[in-house]
Image (cartoon, helix red, strand yellow):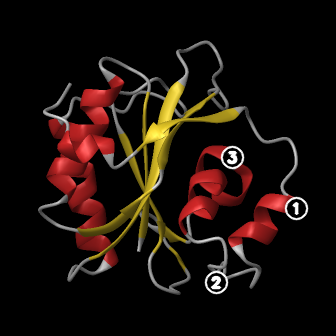
């Protein structure tokens, strides 16, 4: 299972650290990518984002995991206003094993993950040979094929956030 985290409001380091700490209650985190700074996508008149991807395991099924991640977002101040709006935290379920599903509340794999450098770059860092369950291509191949990705530059090791005391 892979989750993507992003933030562009408030203390971004503290937001990511707080989300990781809370996620530790529902996900066994195996690996965390570097933190990347990326340009906003869609609505561009907002601060740059910090993003990371984590790999982990959970006993939860996808729907309860989605509920848990949305509860963490709310706890950390997320208020949904409009698509691609600035936000203190965003937690997206990218991949859940090899599941493919489309329904009203949950789509797996994440429907826009192959269009986002802030997902593909950290995901390729963690597992370049991981295969996308729909295309069958590796994440490395998907990254090579992707065009028009936003600027996305590594900042620091995401593991630093685990020892952070929120700031």
Q: SS of the residue at dot 3?
A: helix
Q: Which of 84 and 5 is in front in this view?
A: 5
**What mark, if any, has residue 117 been given in the picture?**
3
Question: Mark 1 or mark 2: which comes first in sequence?
Answer: 2
Question: Mark 3 or mark 2: which comes first in sequence?
Answer: 3
Badge 2: how crowded within 10 Å, few (<14), some, or many (20+)? some
Q: SS of the residue at dot 1?
A: helix
Q: Position of residue 83 (x, y in %)?
A: 53, 34
Q: Nearer the viewer, residue 50 or 159?
A: 159
Q: Position of residue 64 (x, y in %)?
A: 23, 71
Residue at screen point 81% across, 70% down: 141
Residue at screen point 44% across, 77% down: 96
Q: Position of residue 147 (x, y in %)?
A: 88, 49
Residue 16 shown left or right of residue 98 in the figure: left
Question: Mark 1 or mark 3: which comes first in sequence?
Answer: 3
Q: Is residue 41 above or below residue 1?
A: above
Q: Quadrant of the C terminus?
A: top left
Inter-mark Cα distance, 3 to 2: 19 Å
Badge 3: how crowded within 10 Å, few (<14), some, or many (20+)? many
Q: SS of the residue at dot 2?
A: loop
Mark 1, residue position? 145
* Residue 95 visible in the snapshot: yes
Inter-mark Cα distance, 1 to 3: 12 Å
Mark 2, residue position? 133
Tag nearer the camera, 1 or 2:
1
């Amino acid at each position: 299972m892979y989750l993507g985290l992003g933030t562009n409001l408030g203390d971004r380091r503290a937001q990511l650290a707080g989300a990781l700490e809370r996620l530790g209650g529902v996900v066994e985190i195996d690996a965390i990518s570097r933190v990347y700074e990326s340009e906003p996508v869609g609505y561009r008149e907002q601060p740059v984002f910090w993003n990371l991807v984590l790999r982990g395991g959970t006993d939860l099924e996808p729907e309860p995991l989605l509920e848990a991640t949305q509860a963490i977002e709310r706890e950390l101040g997320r208020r949904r206003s409009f698509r691609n709006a600035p936000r203190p935290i965003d937690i997206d379920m990218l991949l859940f094993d090899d599941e493919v599903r489309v329904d009203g509340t949950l789509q797996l794999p994440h429907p826009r993950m192959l269009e986002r450098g802030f997902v593909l770059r950290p995901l390729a860092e963690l597992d370049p040979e991981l295969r996308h369950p729909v295309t069958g291509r590796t994440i490395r191949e998907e990254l090579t094929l992707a065009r028009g990705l936003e600027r996305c530059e590594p900042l620091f090791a995401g593991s630093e956030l685990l020892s952070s005391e929120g700031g």
